[in-house]
Structure formats: structure tokens, C-alpha cells
Amino acid sequence: MSTMTSASESTVKTEVTPLKRGCLFTLLRVAKWFSIGLVALLLSGMVYQQMAEASDRQAYTPPGQLIDIGDFRLHIHCIGEGSPTVILEAGTGGSSLDWSLVQPKIARSTRVCAYDRQGYAWSEDGTHVRTSQQVATDLHTLLANAHIEGPYILVGHSIGVIHTQTYVNQFPEDVVGMVMVDRPAAEYLTANLADDEIITNELSLKQIAAARLLNLLGIFRLAGCLSPICHDLPAELLPSYSAAANQTRYFVSVGEEMNYYPANLRYGAALPVMSSALPLVILIHAPDLGSNPNEQIYYEDRLAFASLMPNAHVVVAQGSNHFIQAQRPDLVIEAIMNVVEAIHSG
């Protein structure tokens, strides 16, 4: 007996349903295009930074000379005539431009030179360690190779004071006077804080690393000049200062300097007192407790240091922050001229 099977029973109809693209697929697709867009944005930022930096080099040529000190060249800018020669030493992250409101006024009476440490402004990237001892040696070589004869009045700001103290300790016969502009509270910091705490007290290495990345991508350049000193510089000086501070290498140099900051403070705190025969003016900014609760402690430490220096004249800069040469340049100019006149009068 045969079995009949209907066409409807023998035919199996299969329907293929399209695979639905769920949330995971959508997220992966968004992540893909986001990554591509982010990479493109980062590359654009890097290209912008490099092009703008090249443009800056054309627009802001060195005002002074590039002098070979052996492995690299340092920039030094001297104006005016006369003796003694005033040498201006900037603080951490600073350059010869930090003295833009001071240098021209001093040049009316004597020769005055501002220079850039390795890796800053117009100086080349160097290979030397950034200890105060090496900074002093580099400066000594720079002055000799540039044929800038002494005697010198050394003017330092912030960590630049430690560098100038070190110079006097290494080459005392070269120096006939000093001006210290807001020296760090080295004695308090080194007695009470560990090295990493000293660094963080100023600017943490993580912050510097982040700043290096932002600078590489041109972010800081878009924001303009972010240095605290920029708030007090005339508008015509801001473009050149911004160009120097927005170099790709800028925060590399700052980071390297900060690595040696605790050691330099400890070295400075152990240096002997200045000779009583050396005219000395010490400027200290008045404490602003609203900006930093430790301001009073630092102020008292600076006063205590000044009290140990024989023949020191202390000036408290009212209405100024740490950058006295920008907020109260009149006081810095007066201090330098007082030392110049003291030397001339014998």
C-alpha cells in the first residue's frame, strides 16, 4: 500500500531572518569612529604645535648672542655700558624675558645681561645636570666665552638666588654685589619636607607630565600665556613670552629642573653666609595668606635667612606676589642701582 504525501507536507519552507544589530555592535562602531576622530585630532594638534613653533622661531629671533659653552650654546642678551656688569638669573621655568621690565632701566646706568639656561627660550637643549653647581659653572663659562668681563653684580630670582649664591661660593673673586629676589624658603622646606613633598609643594611631577602632553598638542598655545608672570607684563611683551613658554621642549626643561629642585635647596641651605664686604639687597614679597596658608611660614623663613646675612638691606615688597620683578619692578631696579652706587662709592 503506497503512502501519498501532499506537496504542502513534503515542502519545508525556511525563512531566513536578518541578524539584528544590537547595542554592542553600535557601541563598537561608535568607539571605532571615536578613536579615529581622536587620533586625527591629536595628530592635528601636534602638527599645529610644530607649525606654530616654527613660525615663532622666524618671528622672534634671539635678541642677544648664542655662545658655545662646549656641548651646546646658551643665549645671553647684554645692553648698556659701564661697570660693574649686572647678571640676571631667572627662577625655575623662567628666562631672560622675565627681566623685561627691569633690564632696560638698569642699562641706562651700566651694562646688564640676562641669559637663558639650557632648554629655555633661545638657548639650546643641553646635556648637563641641572644642579646649582653646574648652573654656576655654565654661567662662568658663558661669561668667559662671550668676553663679558667682570666684576659682576648677581641678581637672582627664586631658585636663581640659590644659583647665584653658588656662583659666589665657586667664583668669589668675580662678584662685587648681589640682589636676591624672593629666595625660596630653603631652610624651612628642607628641614620639614621630604624631597617629593618639596617638589609637590611647587608643582608635582604628574602635573608637569600632563603639561608636557598638553603642550605637545598645542593646547597651551591656544590658551595663550598661562605663566603667572604674564598677568603683569605689558601687552607688547606677551607674544614673545608666550612663544618661549609654549615651546614643545618647555615642560621637559621644567621637569628636569624640578628633579634637582630639592637637592639644590639643600645645597643652598648649607652654603656659608655672604661676606660682610659684599653689598647685598634682599627683596621678600609680603605674605598673602589668601593664596597659600604657608605664606606666613615662608615669609618668616626668608626673614630669618636675611637676618643671618651681614650688611644685608631687606626690602619687603608690598602688593606683590612671588614675581616681584614683574609686579614691583621699581623695587628691583632701585635695589640693583643701590648696589651699583655702593660699589661706585667704595
Image: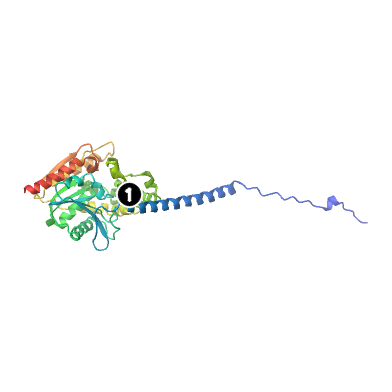
Q: Quadrant of the N terminus?
A: bottom right
**Res. 174 in view:** yes
Q: Name the residue at the right extreme.
A: 1
What residue lies at 33% left-to-right and 49% top-to-bottom?
A: 243
Task: Report whether 53 appears left or right of 141.
Answer: right
* Image quadrant in which you'd find residue 314: top left
Percent position of residue 179, x then y: 16, 47
Three-letter code for the amino acid on which mark 1 is drawn: Ala
Task: Report whether 259 appears left or right of 78.
Answer: right
Identify the element where label 1 is drawn. Answer: helix
Q: Nearer the viewer, residue 345 or 138?
A: 345
The crowding category of the residue bearing disc 1, from other C-alpha atoms within 10 Å (few below 14, some 14 to 19, many at least 20), is: many
Percent position of residue 303, x then y: 17, 42
What residue lies at 18% left-to-right and 44% top-to-bottom?
A: 105
What residue lies at 6% left-to-right and 47% top-to-bottom?
A: 345
Task: Report whether 22 appears left or right of 112.
Answer: right
Q: Nearer the viewer, residue 307 or 240?
A: 240
Residue bearing mark 1: 243
**Res. 268 in view:** no
